[in-house]
Amino acid sequence: MLAHAPNQSYIFLRIYDHGVGGHFEINSDDLSRVLGIKLQRELTVEDIEPYLAEIHRYYQQHVQFSSAAGSHAIAFEDSEILSIDLGDFVRLYFSLQNMEESPQGLDIDYSVLFDIDRTHLGLQVIEYHWEAGIHNNEANVSLIFSPDQTSQHLDLSGSSVMNGFTAMVKSGTHHIYIGLDHILFLLALLLPAVVRRDTGDGLEIPGSGTSNNFFPGFLKPYASAWQPVDGFKTAFIYVIKIVTFFTIAHTITLSLAALEIIKLPSALVESVIALSIALAAFHNIYPLLSHGKEWIIAFVFGLFHGFGFASVLGDIGLSGDYMVLSLLGFNLGVEVGQIMIVCIIFPVLFLMRKTIVYRPVLVYGSMFLILVALSWFFDRSLGVDLPLDNFVEKVYAKILNKIV
């Protein structure tokens, strides 16, 4: 988030294909000074309602927008309070009138507080602009207004649909890398990709091997059942099948949720995603489905992972602008991220499959995934904060920081 500072006020702009909106932010103490009123600390929206008309008039007198289409009056909408350590900031949401499409540039005149404070600065931020690849930006300042520079031009001509599409691809890829739960679900599905489970009418236990020494008696039958595949082709077909069904599933629900056709509570979605990791990993120890049916796990739980991806699109703050391209770009980015993860993990697993350590990695790795997933499940569904999930997330964050 943009670091708010004393003696600063802000314009956040959202550039849509059909026009421009945004909000102003001003410290309540500064607002009290300029209007000659007394706003209390720990403000609420109800506290500023008696003064809203006066506040709106002040801004309309001290901020003007214009473009090649002419001048654009400010139409105020909702208000809210942002409370931070520095104090309370009043947010005034608005849209610009006389605008039917996104302009190539805006001329902005800004003189808020300059008449009483020569040290004051006005900062302008583009919070959202799809064609420029900007989504929920609160950090990068485009223009800085001062008493000596009250009129400036905001250039929007360098934007393009390709920029927006590329940004959505990057956003999808980024989400896969920071989404540890999605990565662990893929890992749980990939662990058995380079082995096969020997089953007949029941569980067939091959002769005991050296690697069986790694397991207590109750685990030996399930660990011994996994045998390495002979060739690359068998394992690769398994991976393609799993990833394809996972992709189909999350594409369906990502689209339905982003288009607001179906909505599920976030807590439910995140809890089921955690549960999906646990069940996929448990299947690696004790079979829940017959051999070759693992795609069902990938598809069923992939539906919920799609709802999880959709929540990210909501956090980005997308409007109806280019929604089809946004979905396509984000989904493509997710697939690029998935493929890169598979390309990293799968060759390692394939080379390890005939070594003495692979079955212990498969079984004990799956048990660890179950513990982590259950920790997430209890945290997300019941609000029980367990140390294991915090530890895993901190370790992964450190790994990401070193890689990035």
Image (cartoon, rainbow, N blue to C red):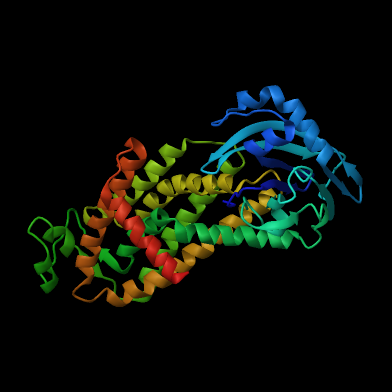
- Decide which of 68, 289 is in the foreground and name it: 68
Q: Position of residue 206 (x, y in %)?
A: 13, 66
Report whether residue 238 is seen.
Answer: no
Q: Is residue 33 above or below residue 187?
A: above
**Total count of labels:** 0
Residue lying at 73% horizontally and 56% vertically, measured from the top left: 144
Which residue sits at x=17%, y=56%? Answer: 203
In the depicted view, which residue is nearer to us: 323 or 35?
35
Q: Is residue 320 visible?
A: yes
**What residue lies at 30% left-to-right and 56% top-to-bottom?**
391
- Tell me: residue 6, above or below residue 188: above
Image check: 133 left or right of 385? right
Could you tell me residue 236's position as x and y percent?
A: 40, 70
The image position of residue 213, as x and y in percent, is 9, 68
Q: Position of residue 15 (x, y in %)?
A: 74, 49
Towards the viewer: 176 or 297: 176
